[in-house]
Amino acid sequence: MRQCVEKMAHTARNAELVENLITSFGLPKSSPKFRATKEKTLRGWKDHHFARTNQFAVQDRYDGLAEKFTVRNREDLSDALQTRLKELPTQSKWLPEILALLLELSDRPLENTNIEDLDALSKPADLPSELSWNDIIAEDPLDEDGVWDDIERGYHSSGDDATVDGDDEPTTSTVATSVDEEDSEVLARLHLVTPDENALNEVRDSLPSKGSTGKQPMSELVLVRGTLMMLRGLETEVYRLNEKNGDIKVNLDVSLSPAAQGTLQRVCMQVAHIGSRLNLLRKWTQRVQETPFVQSVQSAVESHLSAFSHHLNGLEQRFVTPKQNTVVSIIDVRAQAEKLTRPLRYLADVIEHTESIRPNVRNSHFELLDALFNASCSTQMSGDKDDFKAIVAVFLAGLKTYLRPIAVWVTTGTVPPASEGEFFVSDSNANCELGQVWHERWSLRTSVDGGPLMPRFLRPFSARIFAQGKAKAFLKLLDSRSKDFATESTHTGFSNFLQTLDAGIKSNDLLPVDQLFEDSFTSWLEDSGSDGAGTLRAKLLNTGVLYKTFNSQQYAFFGKDGTLFQQFAENVFERMWRRPESWQDSFMLTEYAQSTLGTRDEIEDRSLSIHITGSENRTKQVARPMVQHLGDLHLRMAMPWPVLNVTRSSNLPTHSAIFALLLQTLYAATLLHTHVSTLPPSSDKSSTLPQPNRTAFLLNWKLTCFVNALHHHITSSAAHLHGAMMTEMQAADGIDSMAAIWSEYERRLETALLLAPNLSPIKEAIVGILEMCEQFAGQWRRLFPGLAASINLRGTGKPATQSDDDSKGRADDRGDATELLKQFDRSLSFVKAGLRGLSCAGGDAALEAFAETLEANTE
C-alpha cells in the first residue's frame, strides 16, 4: 500500500513538472493543445529511463585528457585542468553528469584552448580604487570662499611690474573659461570637425539608394563599369558572385532608364553567363594539381586569362580616357566580351566535362589531354581559327610536359620516378634475374578500361614506345659503357619534334591535326629510338653470342656429331649393363656428357649437365624397362643471360625430350645389332630355319627398319627446323621477334617429333615399339640357348642382366616372338595412321615422309 502511495505521488509530481515546463514555453492551460501536449510529454517521459552517469568512467576520461595534454607538450593545460578538478565541490550529486556534459560539449580542447582565456574567468583581484574628482573635492571643496577669485600681485609677489617676465602669458580670467553644468554640449562642439558633405555627393549620387524598394535606375556608364569589373571576377552591385562555385547572378532590382527592363535583364544575364564560365576557369587554375602536365595546362589557361584581361584594359581605356567621341553601350560591351571569350568558354566546357567524369576513374587526368586533342580536331574542322589557335596552344603545352618522361624512356631507357606523375611503364621487378629481365622487369600499367595508362590518342604507339625503351635499358645492362646515351640529343630531338608539330599545325590547314600528330610522332620515334633496337639486334647477332649458343644445341641435343653422340650413348649403356641398380648417377652421367659432347668447340663443356627426373618418386621394387629409364634423363645447357631472354627458359624441355628419345632409339638399335652380330655363320646353306626362328628374324628386321627410320626422322627434322629458325633469327628486328620465333620453333619441334601433349598417344606407341626391342632380347636368347652362355653384351662379362631377366619375364607373360610380331604390327598401324592424319591436318611434309618410310620398309 505504501509503494502505491509513493508511486501516485511521483506521478503527480511529474505531471506538475510537465505542466510548468509547457507553460514556460508560452502555451497556457486554457489552450486546447495543452492537454494533448501534456499527455504526449508524459508518455515520452515514461518511455525513457536513463541511468546515472558512471562517475568512474568520467574520471578516467578526464585523467586520459590530462595525460594527452602532457604527452602533446601542453603541461600548462594539464596542470590547469587537474587544479580545477580538485577545486570542484563534491557535495553535488549531479557533478558526474555536469562533467560528462562538458566533455560532450568540448571541441578539440588541445587545439582550441588558450591558457590565457582562463584568466578572464577568474575573479579580479582587489585593487586599490583609483583617485577620482569626488575624492579630491571632498578634501578641498570647490565652494569655499576665495577659491575662484583672481590673484592680484602684491608686495609678497616674487617681482613687481618692472620685473615681469616678457615670456609670461597674461592670465585668463576664470569667469571667461568657466562653463555652467547645463552647457556641456557647447564644450563638445569645440572638439567636433564638420566633414565636407560636397566631397561625397558625386559618389553618393552615382550609387543606387539602399533604402529604396523599387527599381534602382542607373546610368549606362555605371552598368558598363560594373560589367567590366564582373568580367575580371569581382562582385558589383549589379552582379552577385557566388564565392563557392563562381556563378554570377544578376540583381533584378537594377534598371536602365532608356532601355526596357526585359532587354536589360537579358543582356545582363548573357554577360553574367560569360563571367560564370570565366570564373570556372579561374577557380580551376587555382586548384593545386600534382600531375605535371595538368599544371602545364593550368599555366596555359592562365596565360589566356591574362591576355583577356589586357583586352579588358583596352575596353576600359575607351571610357576612361577617350581619344574620340565614344558611345557607351552595354550591348557593344556584351558583343566584345562574347568575341574575346569564345576560346575561353570553349576551354571551360572541355574542363567542366573532364571534371564531371573524374571520380573513381583512374585515367581521369588523361581524359583532359584526350578532350583537348579532340577539341583541337573539331575546332580545326569547324574553321574557327581563334578557337583553334587557343585550344591547340593549351593542348601542346600539356602534351609537351607529358611527353618529356616518354622522351627520356625512349632515348635512354630510364623509367621516371613516381613523383613525375603517372607513367605507363613500371619498373616493377628491378631485382629480377638477368635471364628474365626483358620479359619480367618492365611492365605496362593499365587503366580501368584495360588499355595502357596513357591518353587514348597515344595508345596506338604504346607497344612501340615500350619496346624502344626496353631496348635502350637492355643495352645499358648488356654494355656498361652505354649507360649514358646522348642526353643533349634527347632534348634537341624532342624540341625539334614539338617545333615541327607546332609549325605543321599552323601552316597546314588542310591536313587534320590527328594526321599531323601521327606523322610527326612516328618520325620522332624513328629518329630517337630506332637506333636502340638496331644496336641491340647487332650486339646479339654480330657478336656471335646468339649464333654460338643455338648452334651448340644441335650437337648437344640433336646428335649432329654422330660419333660423339654415339660415344656418349655407349658410355651410358655400358654403365647401365655394369651397374643396373646404380647407373642413374647424375654426377657420372654429367661427366660422360662433358667428356664426350663437351669436346666440340661449339660447346662449353662445363655448360652441360644431366638430371634424372622422377626417380625420387619411384620405389626400387617397381621393374621398368631400360627404355623408360632412359626417358628420365634430361640434358641441360647453361646459356648466357641475353640468350635466356630469347628462350625464356634455361631448361629447354622440348630439346631435352628429343635428347632422351634419341638415346632410347640408339639403345634399341644397339640391342637389335647385338642379336644379329652374335649369330655364327651358317655351314649348310640348304638348311631351312624353324618357323619360330624365321619369325624372330622377321621381327628383328622390322624392328631394325623402324628404329632406323625413327632415328633418321628425328635427326633430319630437328636439323631442318633448327636451320629455318636460325634463318628467321637473322631477319628478326628485336628480342620480342626473336622470342616469338623461338616459341614457334619449339612448337614445330613438338609437332614434328610428336612431343606435344595432344600427340602423346602416338609417342607412347613409338616408345612401346622401342620397348619391344628390349623384350625381344629375352626371346632371342630363348630361341638360341647355345648363344646365351657366350654372349657378353658390350664386353661386360655378364651374359644376362637384370634388364634381360625382366624382359624375359615380360616376354613370357606376353607370349613368344609371334605374339610380339602381332603386337608390333598393331602398334605400327596405329602410328602410321596417326602420322598421316596429323600430316593432313597440319600440312607437315616430314610426318608424311616418315609414314611412307615406315610403310615401305616394314612390309
Image (cartoon, rainbow, N blue to C red):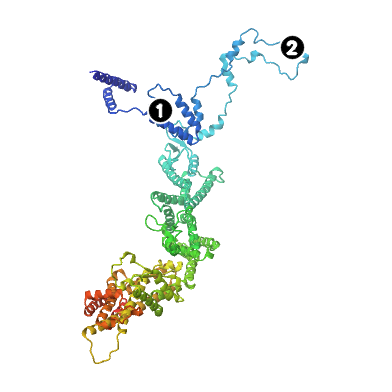
Disc on the earlier residue, 1 or 2: 1
Q: Quadrant of residue 257?
A: top left
Q: Which residue is mark 1?
A: 99
Q: Quadrant of residue 193?
A: top right
Query: Does the image show residue 4?
Result: yes
Q: Nearer the viewer, mark 1 or mark 2?
A: 1
What amino acid is at disc 2? Answer: Ser
Residue 514 placed where, x, y %?
Answer: 43, 61
What amino acid is at disc 1? Answer: Leu
Side of 623 where 458 appears, left or right: right
Residue 379 placed where, x, y %?
Answer: 43, 56
Element under disc 2 = loop
Q: Which mark is residue 490?
A: none
Residue under the image location 44 percent in, 33 percent down: 65
Quadrant assignment for the C terminus: bottom left
Query: Does the image show residue 727?
Result: no
- Nearest the viewer among 291 and 749 is 749
Q: Which residue is mark 2?
A: 157
Residue 821 vertical placement versus 349 (above, below) = below
Badge 2: few (under 14), some or many (20 or more) residues near its Cα, within 10 Å?
A: few
Element under disc 1 = helix
Residue 246 vertical placement versus 569 (above, below) = above
The residue lying furthest to the right in this view is 162
